[in-house]
Amino acid sequence: MYCFSCKKNVKKRINLSNLFEKEYHFICENCFEKYELRLGYEVIPGDTSDIYHFYLFDEKIDIDSNAFSSFFQRYLITFIKNKNKMTILWYDYIKDEVVKLLIKLDFGNLFIISIY
Ligand SMILES: [Zn+2]
Protein backbone atom coordinates (compact mmCIF):
# COMPACT_ATOMS: atom_id res chain seq x y z
CA MET A 1 0.00 0.00 0.00
CA TYR A 2 1.32 3.41 -0.95
CA CYS A 3 1.05 6.78 0.70
CA PHE A 4 -1.24 9.08 -1.32
CA SER A 5 0.94 12.05 -0.40
CA CYS A 6 4.55 11.00 -1.03
CA LYS A 7 3.86 7.77 -2.99
CA LYS A 8 6.20 5.79 -0.73
CA ASN A 9 5.29 2.39 0.63
CA VAL A 10 3.32 2.61 3.88
CA LYS A 11 4.87 0.36 6.45
CA LYS A 12 2.94 -0.26 9.60
CA ARG A 13 4.93 -0.56 12.80
CA ILE A 14 3.70 -3.75 14.37
CA ASN A 15 3.94 -4.30 18.10
CA LEU A 16 1.96 -6.28 20.65
CA SER A 17 -0.68 -3.59 21.08
CA ASN A 18 -1.56 -3.43 17.36
CA LEU A 19 -0.70 -6.95 16.27
CA PHE A 20 -4.29 -7.90 15.41
CA GLU A 21 -5.49 -4.45 14.47
CA LYS A 22 -7.05 -4.32 11.03
CA GLU A 23 -6.97 -0.58 10.58
CA TYR A 24 -5.17 0.61 7.47
CA HIS A 25 -4.26 4.13 6.48
CA PHE A 26 -3.35 5.55 3.11
CA ILE A 27 -0.82 8.01 4.46
CA CYS A 28 2.61 7.28 5.91
CA GLU A 29 3.58 8.43 9.37
CA ASN A 30 6.02 11.05 8.03
CA CYS A 31 3.32 12.71 5.92
CA PHE A 32 0.76 12.36 8.67
CA GLU A 33 2.98 14.35 11.03
CA LYS A 34 3.08 17.25 8.52
CA TYR A 35 -0.66 17.81 8.83
CA GLU A 36 -2.23 18.51 12.18
CA LEU A 37 -5.74 17.13 12.30
CA ARG A 38 -8.20 19.74 13.50
CA LEU A 39 -11.38 17.77 13.81
CA GLY A 40 -14.40 19.96 13.79
CA TYR A 41 -18.14 19.90 13.84
CA GLU A 42 -20.74 22.45 12.92
CA VAL A 43 -24.49 22.51 12.65
CA ILE A 44 -25.86 24.51 9.76
CA PRO A 45 -29.50 25.28 10.44
CA GLY A 46 -32.01 25.18 7.62
CA ASP A 47 -35.66 26.16 7.47
CA THR A 48 -37.04 22.70 8.21
CA SER A 49 -33.92 20.57 8.61
CA ASP A 50 -30.32 20.88 9.69
CA ILE A 51 -26.95 19.94 8.24
CA TYR A 52 -24.46 18.27 10.58
CA HIS A 53 -21.01 18.81 9.13
CA PHE A 54 -17.92 16.98 10.41
CA TYR A 55 -14.50 17.86 9.03
CA LEU A 56 -10.87 16.85 9.56
CA PHE A 57 -9.21 20.22 8.92
CA ASP A 58 -10.47 23.75 9.45
CA GLU A 59 -8.56 25.09 6.44
CA LYS A 60 -7.62 23.90 2.98
CA ILE A 61 -4.69 21.52 2.79
CA ASP A 62 -2.81 20.62 -0.35
CA ILE A 63 -2.96 16.83 -0.35
CA ASP A 64 -4.76 14.06 -2.18
CA SER A 65 -7.98 13.63 -0.24
CA ASN A 66 -7.70 9.84 -0.49
CA ALA A 67 -4.81 9.99 1.97
CA PHE A 68 -7.24 10.72 4.80
CA SER A 69 -10.15 8.61 3.59
CA SER A 70 -9.46 5.93 6.21
CA PHE A 71 -10.09 8.48 8.96
CA PHE A 72 -13.73 8.66 7.95
CA GLN A 73 -14.21 5.04 8.94
CA ARG A 74 -15.00 5.99 12.54
CA TYR A 75 -17.62 8.51 11.43
CA LEU A 76 -19.24 5.95 9.16
CA ILE A 77 -19.28 3.26 11.86
CA THR A 78 -20.79 5.69 14.37
CA PHE A 79 -23.37 6.77 11.83
CA ILE A 80 -24.36 3.18 11.01
CA LYS A 81 -24.41 2.04 14.65
CA ASN A 82 -26.78 4.85 15.61
CA LYS A 83 -29.11 3.83 12.76
CA ASN A 84 -29.66 7.41 11.83
CA LYS A 85 -32.31 8.06 9.26
CA MET A 86 -30.35 10.98 7.94
CA THR A 87 -28.70 11.04 4.54
CA ILE A 88 -24.94 10.92 4.65
CA LEU A 89 -22.79 12.77 2.13
CA TRP A 90 -19.04 12.63 1.75
CA TYR A 91 -17.17 15.53 0.16
CA ASP A 92 -13.49 16.36 -0.19
CA TYR A 93 -14.41 19.98 0.32
CA ILE A 94 -17.85 21.45 0.66
CA LYS A 95 -18.37 24.93 -0.72
CA ASP A 96 -20.79 27.43 0.75
CA GLU A 97 -22.78 27.42 -2.51
CA VAL A 98 -23.32 23.67 -2.17
CA VAL A 99 -24.50 24.10 1.43
CA LYS A 100 -26.98 26.79 0.36
CA LEU A 101 -28.23 24.53 -2.44
CA LEU A 102 -28.65 21.55 -0.07
CA ILE A 103 -30.64 23.71 2.32
CA LYS A 104 -32.90 24.87 -0.53
CA LEU A 105 -33.44 21.29 -1.75
CA ASP A 106 -34.57 20.33 1.77
CA PHE A 107 -33.51 16.67 1.80
CA GLY A 108 -34.14 16.52 5.53
CA ASN A 109 -31.36 16.34 8.06
CA LEU A 110 -28.00 15.70 6.41
CA PHE A 111 -24.85 14.22 7.88
CA ILE A 112 -21.89 15.52 5.91
CA ILE A 113 -18.26 14.53 6.33
CA SER A 114 -15.44 16.28 4.51
CA ILE A 115 -11.69 16.76 4.55
CA TYR A 116 -12.01 20.53 5.06
ZN1 LIG B 1 3.93 9.82 2.80
Image (cartoon, rainbow, N blue to C red):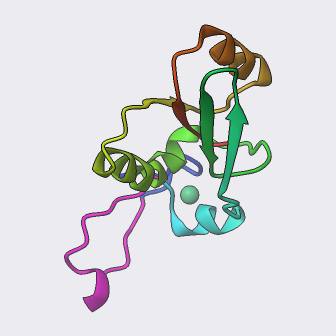
Relative vertical location of residue 71 with respect to residue 13 in this rendering, above or below: above
Q: Is residue 70 left or right of residue 59?
A: left
The image position of residue 36, as x and y in percent, is 70, 64
Q: Measured from the top left, where is residue 53 in percent x and y?
A: 62, 40
Residue 75 seen: yes
Q: Which stretch appears magenta?
A: 10-26
**Residue ranking furthest to the left:** 20
Q: Is residue 115 above or below residue 108?
A: below
**Magenta stretch encompasses residue 99:** no
Q: Is residue 35 above or below residue 116?
A: below
Please tell me in which quadrant of the rendered image residue 96 appears. top right
Quadrant where ligand 1 appears: bottom right
Left or right of 81: which side holds 40? right
Query: Would you say 4 lies left or right of 53 here?
Result: left
Query: Which residue appears farthest toward the top when viewing the image?
Result: 105
Query: Is residue 101 shown above or below 113?
Result: above
Q: Position of residue 21 (x, y in %)?
A: 25, 72
What residue is rendered at 63% in x and 16% in y? 102
Q: Nearer the viewer, residue 81 or 76?
A: 81
Q: Position of residue 76 (x, y in %)?
A: 38, 46
Which sits in the foreground, 72 or 25?
Answer: 72
Q: Which residue is located at x 53 percent, y 49 percent? A: 68
Q: Quadrant of the C terminus?
A: top right
